[in-house]
Image: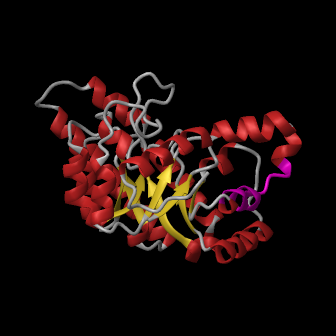
Amino acid sequence: MKFGVSPLSLEFMINRVIKEKGIEGLSNFRLSEVVEEIAKEGFKHCEITTDVFQLLPIQITDEDIEELKKIKRRYNITYSAHFPILSIELACPNKFIRDASIRSTIDAYESFIQLENDIEMYILHPTGEFIRDAMGFIRDPKITPIITNIFTETAIKSIEEIIKKTDINRNKIAIENIEYPLQETIKIVKKLKTKLCIDTAHLLGGFSGNYDLLKITEKYLDITGEIHLQDYVDDNLYADHGALGKGKKFPPEFLNLIYQMDFKGPIVFEFPKKEIITSIKYIKHHAPQIKVLNL
């Protein structure tokens, strides 16, 4: 199985780059150096967070792209790219916000166009914080289905426009289950003929509705392109980014299920090294048949 990390969090950029090196750290930042560091540790996949390239004054250069290609061959690793999520709202009824969100997503794709053949999956959130807040605000059972359908159809339209303008392969888009009804996310995936990205903590935390992680995985793993593997920990600052076993909900049977179903896609940890080490120990204890790196 192919385990990887998503190293370019804002926390990482602030603490490891800006705090340690100041503004010079941003001007000298090289993605390839970060990727090679995790490749040397034994990870077989890197999820590239594209948000940071739009939020911070850093660049992805041609030289950096070429080095990333070399690292892929040298260490036999793979890449995915997570499209921007901060301030992005592809389902927004406001066309100006929606159009800007589409442009942001397209810009992220084009910024890594030279790496397109090396990127296995593009992770995309169909909705954002505005829709999350609106869904919480609208409680009338007669209105909720109508509004939800509007949001879903708007997201579909936006993603179709992104596909049309970039000519991106639909099979390389994985739409993540987030704070939006899971069946609506599945509807988007099926209508667009894309893949699903299963985030275990989002399901465990009820972000996508009241569902059983094992049943959902068994039902939809065949259309899943990537898994974000994490626990839901109530008292964490980021509750949906907890180390495995630190919450009260992660079922160890999940690991055996994806092993038995022979999942081939990337399995990504979206938290710091300390939590990754804890999670790897959890996997070794509960699913020793799964080969995982030593840290």
Question: Between residues 80 and 41, which one lies in front from this camera angle?
Answer: 41
Q: Is residue 118 above or below residue 89?
A: below
Magenta includes 30?
A: yes
Query: Is 53 left, or right, of 99 in this rendering?
Result: right
User: Which residues, given as a range, are shown in magenta?
Assistant: 27-38
Residue 255 pos. (x, y %): 34, 53
* Residue 238 left/right relative to 187: right
Furthest toward the right, the residue is 24
The front one of 51 and 262 is 262
Residue drawn at point x = 52 percent, y = 54 percent? 83
Q: Nearer the viewer, residue 273 or 238?
A: 273
Magenta-drawn stretch contains 149: no
- Residue 232: horizontal and vertical position, in percent? 39, 34
The answer to whether residue 1 is visible is: yes
Viewer-side residue, 288 vs 92: 288
Q: Residue at x 44, y 30 (%)?
A: 239
Q: Quadrant of residue 223?
A: bottom left
Seen in the picture, residue 68 relative to 50 is either above or below; the reply is below
Q: Main secondary structure of the magenta part?
A: helix
Colouring used for the render: secondary structure
